[in-house]
Amino acid sequence: MPDAERLQNMLDKFEIQEVVTAACYSRDSADWDTLRDSYHPDGKVTVSWHSGPVDEFIERSKKMMAARGPQDFVKHVNANQRVRLNGDRAIIEYDVILHNRRIMDGFAIDFHTWSRYFDQVEKRDDKWRIFIRSAIYEKDRMDPHNPREIPDSFYEDMNLEQYPLNIRYHCWRNAKTGQKPPEGLILARSEKEKEVREAAEKWLAGG
């Protein structure tokens, strides 16, 4: 590969990594202008509580942020990014761990969710932006900040059977604030994940 082409590939990969990182960081920090600029106008997002246009995702994110209490915190940490380029299209995959502190029925609970983000990114008007973001959920857990203060009745009243095993605590937490899993929810090692990956590969190849 000629040096000029190698250099361009490095620049493209860097810009792609920057834009997907900005999308995670800006949502956590309520930087809505940066979040919107990270996606193309026709961008789509599928996460645990939304599957559809990015504009709807941002509006719902604003409402969720506004409803958080002073002791509620959220942070998406991403790592192990892998970019595959094909002209003005690319797929970037990376691990994401979501750390979430919420006050549930008066008790401080820490939630942790492991997922694989699978982003289809496209260069338009000389700028890379996200076209489709798909979160693939692997596992989750919840831990009380102070186990001694939570009565047994708190756990006895939890109905987890209605939620997918991979992220049942995550979904239970969301449901407490009216956020239900979408029909497009993607679970690791499922047929839905296979479909999403196959469709993305065809898109990357130019289809």
Image: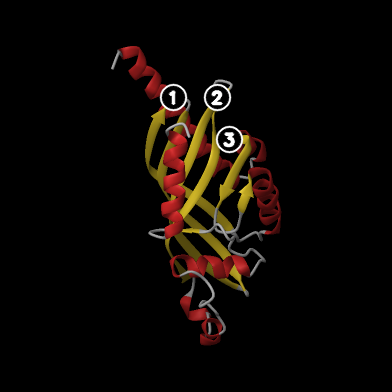
Q: Where is residue 153 in the image (x, y as percent from the top left)?
A: 55, 87
| Residue farthest to the front, as pictured | 207
The first of marks 2 and 3 along the sequence is 3
Q: Do the residues labelled 2 and 1 touch (CB within 8 Å)?
A: no
In this rendering, the label closer to the viewer, 2 or 1 = 1
Q: Where is residue 116 in the image (x, y as percent from the top left)?
A: 42, 51
Q: Distance between the residues labelled 2 and 3?
A: 10 Å
Q: How far apart are marks 2 and 1 (CA)?
A: 13 Å
Residue tagged 1 = 87
Amino acid type, callout 3? Ser
Q: How far apart are marks 3 and 1 (CA)?
A: 19 Å
- Residue drawn where x is 48% and y is 26% of the image: 88
Amino acid type, callout 1? Gly
Left or right placement of residue 64 versus residue 205 in this view: right
Left or right placement of residue 65 versus residue 126 in this view: right
Front-most of 55 and 157? 55
Residue tagged 2 = 127
Position of 196 relative to 138 (above/below)? above
| Colouring scheme, one of rainbow, by chain, secondary structure, one colour | secondary structure
